[in-house]
């Protein structure tokens, strides 16, 4: 007999809408999941929609079966689509432009491309290190500085555009606008549509933020068309010049605008979260930190700039990143929808029903992970990896719609951590306690650290 998906009691008409704290939905979902640990799935009625959340690895394996479930652009992604348009992140699978852009842009994410981007990765990482060296002993705003690093890196490598974020005490207006728009998308996701319509001032600010982001994108494209900066094989070069190898189609001007904005956002926001959480973990895990210092001292002695080949030889730092993505996934959930009526673990899922994979709970599921709350980088040794549940780790999403920028993020993050650790001893005199800030993605809020030089520099 079909089982009923468990759900917390809600109110008539409003369902569970009012139970979800507007600025911390993920924390609430994690609490609800704890009540339904045995079932591994729960259901909420939010803003007139039924949301199903899964976090048991066996059930996640079922919804990751692409013959039965597909990514669909539902809230909150349908709200993000108001500014991401038909860019890769917010395009429907069945829109021809998704496949065209995917195939056109894939070469920009090959290993060979990572090697080609390496000088720019290094240039921006150098700016971070120089900026921290000049602020030794001060409280450094970790998430803001990681955002400066990752935004400058994607814009320089992808589009030949320099934000020069480390030269400015304020975050760039693009970032303010993006933070505003992503937060508004998160709030709207939990609002009944008539409430959204009533909030006129929010609507005006939202439109202003979208216009600010689009203006920057138009400047970037205009500069390239006028012959300024960037390589023809970078993301923007491919968008402007390459044809889809399968259909011969070229991307339209409107789609290129949407792709540039999509990559400016998707290409930095989560990597910034990853690096911030990684630094948080290192300050709490002296053993892992000591091993990372050993590694950089061994592979990167002296002051020579690291080469791409050396960065690819790192072993401890990549495992720190993988374990960080397990415990503190910057993306809290991704969604898929049932292609036909189906069931998962005996629970019926009707056609078109959206299902969210709740990463913070999946990644600490005791059915898949021993000592799930412990930071242990040795889980990522090859012999241990083989024993992992195949669906228990999904920080980059699933299947065809998984993150195209995975290697980009991991290469950039390896280099940044190696450069930081080679140069600085880290401390956290205020013993920061984790407080998550959510703007659709997650970051540690108000986290600061201090640095001092480990070795004397000429
Ligand atoms: C998709 C995570 C870095 C570009 C995704 C998805 C996840 C994800 C979970 C799937 C979303 C869904 O199913 O709705 C991450 C994490 C990152 C990261 C955790 C860093 C640690 C990047 C970078 C780029 C990027 C650096 C670009 C340079 C994209 C794009 C998509 C995507 C374009 C949409 C792909 C498609 O549907 O065709 N990412 N991402 N991401 N990511 Fe990333």
Image: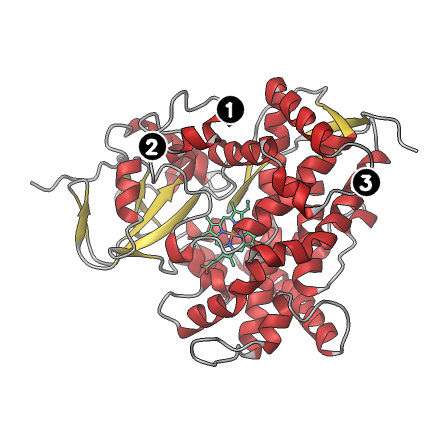
Instruction: Read off the residue under disc 3.
Output: 304
Instruction: Pinpoint residue 133: horizontal percent, then vertical percent.
Output: 84, 34
Q: Earlier in the sequence, mark 2 or mark 1?
A: 2
Disc 1 and disc 3: Cα gap in Å? 31 Å
Disc 2 and disc 1: Cα gap in Å? 21 Å
Disc 2 and disc 3: Cα gap in Å? 49 Å
Q: Residue at (50%, 66%) from the top-left corner? A: 87
- Direction from residue 435 to residue 90 in the image, left or right: left
Instruction: Pinpoint residue 43: horizontal percent, then vertical percent.
Output: 27, 41
Instruction: Read off the residue under disc 1.
Output: 375
Disc 3 secondary structure class: loop
Q: Are marks 2 and 3 in contact (CB under 8 Å)?
A: no
Instruction: Read off the residue under disc 2.
Output: 33
Q: Quadrant of residue 223?
A: bottom right
Q: Which quadrant, please, contains the N terminus? A: top left
Q: Earlier in the sequence, mark 1 or mark 3?
A: 3
- Direction from residue 227 to residue 237 in the image, left or right: left
Res 37 seen here? yes
Q: Nearer the viewer, residue 244 or 374?
A: 244
Residue behind label 2 places its C-beta within 8 angstroms of ligand 1: no
Q: Are marks 2 and 1 in contact (CB under 8 Å)?
A: no
Q: Are marks 1 and 3 in contact (CB under 8 Å)?
A: no
Q: From the image, state whether disc 2 or disc 1 is nearer to you.
A: 1
449 in relation to 218, above or below: above
* Mark 1 surroundings within 10 Å by alpha-carbon count, few (fewer than 14), some (14 through 19), many (20 or more): some
Disc 2 secondary structure class: helix
Q: How many marks?
A: 3
């Amino acid at each position: 007999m079909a089982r009923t998906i468990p759900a917390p009691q809600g109110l008539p008409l409003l369902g569970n809408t009012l139970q979800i704290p507007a600025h911390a939905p993920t924390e609430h979902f994690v609490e609800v999941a704890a009540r339904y640990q045995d079932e591994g799935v729960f259901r909420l009625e939010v803003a007139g929609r039924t949301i199903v959340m899964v976090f048991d690895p066996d059930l996640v394996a079922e919804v990751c079966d692409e013959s039965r479930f597909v990514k669909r652009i539902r809230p909150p992604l349908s709200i993000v689509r108001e500014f991401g348009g038909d860019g890769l992140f917010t395009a429907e699978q069945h829109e021809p432009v998704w496949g065209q852009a995917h195939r056109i842009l894939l070469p920009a994410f090959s290993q060979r491309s990572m090697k080609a981007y390496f000088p720019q990765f290094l240039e921006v990482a150098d700016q971070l290190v120089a900026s921290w060296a000049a602020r030794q002993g001060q409280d450094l705003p970790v998430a803001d500085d990681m955002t400066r690093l990752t935004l400058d890196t994607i814009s320089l490598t992808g589009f030949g555009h320099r934000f020069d974020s480390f030269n400015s005490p304020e975050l760039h207006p693009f970032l303010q606008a993006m933070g505003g728009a992503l937060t508004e998308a998160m709030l709207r996701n939990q609002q009944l549509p008539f409430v959204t319509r009533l909030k006129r001032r929010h609507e005006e600010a939202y439109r202003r933020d979208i216009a600010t982001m689009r203006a920057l994108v138009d400047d970037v494209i205009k500069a390239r068309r006028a012959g300024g900066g960037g390589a023809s094989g970078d993301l923007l070069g491919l968008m402007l010049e390459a044809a889809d190898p399968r259909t011969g189609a070229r991307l339209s001007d409107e789609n290129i605008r949407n792709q540039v904005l999509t990559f400016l956002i998707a290409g930095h926001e989560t990597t910034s979260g990853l690096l911030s959480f990684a630094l948080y973990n290192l300050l709490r895990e002296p053993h892992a930190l000591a091993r990372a210092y050993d590694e950089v001292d061994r592979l990167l002695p002296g002051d020579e700039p690291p080469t791409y080949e050396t960065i690819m030889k790192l072993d401890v730092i990549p495992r720190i990143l993988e374990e960080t993505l397990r415990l503190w996934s910057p993306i809290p959930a991704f969604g898929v929808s049932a292609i036909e009526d189906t069931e998962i673990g005996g629970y019926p899922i009707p056609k078109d029903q959206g299902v969210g994979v709740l990463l913070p709970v999946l990644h600490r599921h005791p059915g898949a992970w021993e000592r799930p709350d412990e930071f242990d980088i040795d889980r990522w040794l090859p012999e241990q990896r083989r024993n992992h549940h195949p669906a228990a780790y999904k920080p980059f999403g699933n299947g065809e719609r998984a993150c195209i920028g995975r290697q980009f993020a991991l290469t950039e993050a390896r280099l940044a951590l190696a450069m930081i650790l080679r140069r600085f001893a880290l401390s956290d005199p205020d013993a920061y306690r984790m407080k998550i800030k959510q703007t659709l993605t997650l970051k540690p809020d108000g986290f600061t650290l201090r640095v001092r030089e480990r070795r004397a520099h000429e």
